[in-house]
Image (spheres, rainbow, N blue to C red):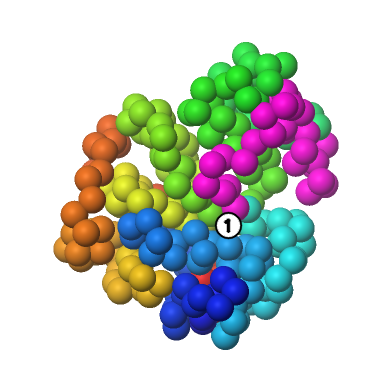
Amino acid sequence: MRASYEEVEVIHGVDATFEEGVVTAVLGANGAGKSTLLALAAGIMGPSQGEVRYAGEKVRVGSTSSLARRGLCLIPEGRGVFPNLTVRENLWVMTHSGSGRRHVERCAFERFPRLEDRANQSAGTLSGGEQQMLALARAVSTNPRLLMLDELSMGLAPIIVDELYNHVIQLAAEGITVVVVEQFARTALSVAASAMVMANGRIIQTGAARDVESVLQSAYLGSVEPTAAIPPGRNGTSGHTDTSSGTP
């Protein structure tokens, strides 16, 4: 699969699969093509060559609503909450998937009790970690089969990152396939079972999470990572998805 922004090709012949029932980490420095890969998988943009498939069906550009109803959920970089709406109103947005307000609130508040305490507070006044919790809570309320997380840890303190990734581990244990795009590799590898490393629009390494660390230094050009509090070696599993090639 190849993909371009106007005349500039940014994904160069990628062939990838997100396996059902596995937490997959997609790693690489800024500009490696990680977020573009997720945009292709979610139908936000289309490939210039090749195709994307989700659960056996071809993904078409602009089919994001249909994909969401079929269980594909993307939390974009920057959290994507509505700052002028309350926490409760942000959750109600997810009723488009067919769930009622009581259901989405119950799913969110049982998992994130802190959000219930702030239910009538504007989302824009929450801390960065709380906004990311709200984004996760909205996603979980749709009962996703595939959850894709783009830079979940961005701008957050390590202790908050630890808390969020503990929730990711729990989601995987409940049968949700998770794809984690992260610039900070150790954080993602601590929860993933498999991993792929991207550089300059190409996948340069795939395999078990424990086996890819040797290629990371060259892929990251020596960038420094924060140390998260999550213990190394915890692998999340479970869920449903097929994306193959090109099926990102």
Q: Check residue 33 for magenta coloring.
A: no
Q: Is residue 218 above or below residue 142?
A: below
Magenta segment boundaries in residue numbering: 74-100
In percent of width and height, residue 181 lies at 43, 54
Q: Is residue 207 above or below residue 145?
A: below
Instruction: Give me the residue at 33% from left, 68% from top.
Output: 199
Return the residue found at the far front: 7
The residue wearing badge 1 is: 146
In percent of width and height, residue 225 lies at 25, 44
Q: Check residue 98 for magenta coloring.
A: yes
Which amino acid type corresponds to the residue marked 1 in the rendered image? Leu
Which residue is nearer to you in this view: 180 or 33?
A: 33
Q: Is residue 181 visible?
A: yes
In percent of width and height, residue 182 lies at 39, 51
Which residue is nearer to you in this view: 137 or 184?
A: 184
Q: Is residue 214 above or below residue 9?
A: above
Give the crowd class for mark 1: few <14, some 14-19, many >=20 residues within 10 Å: many
**Quarter assignment of residue 218:** bottom left
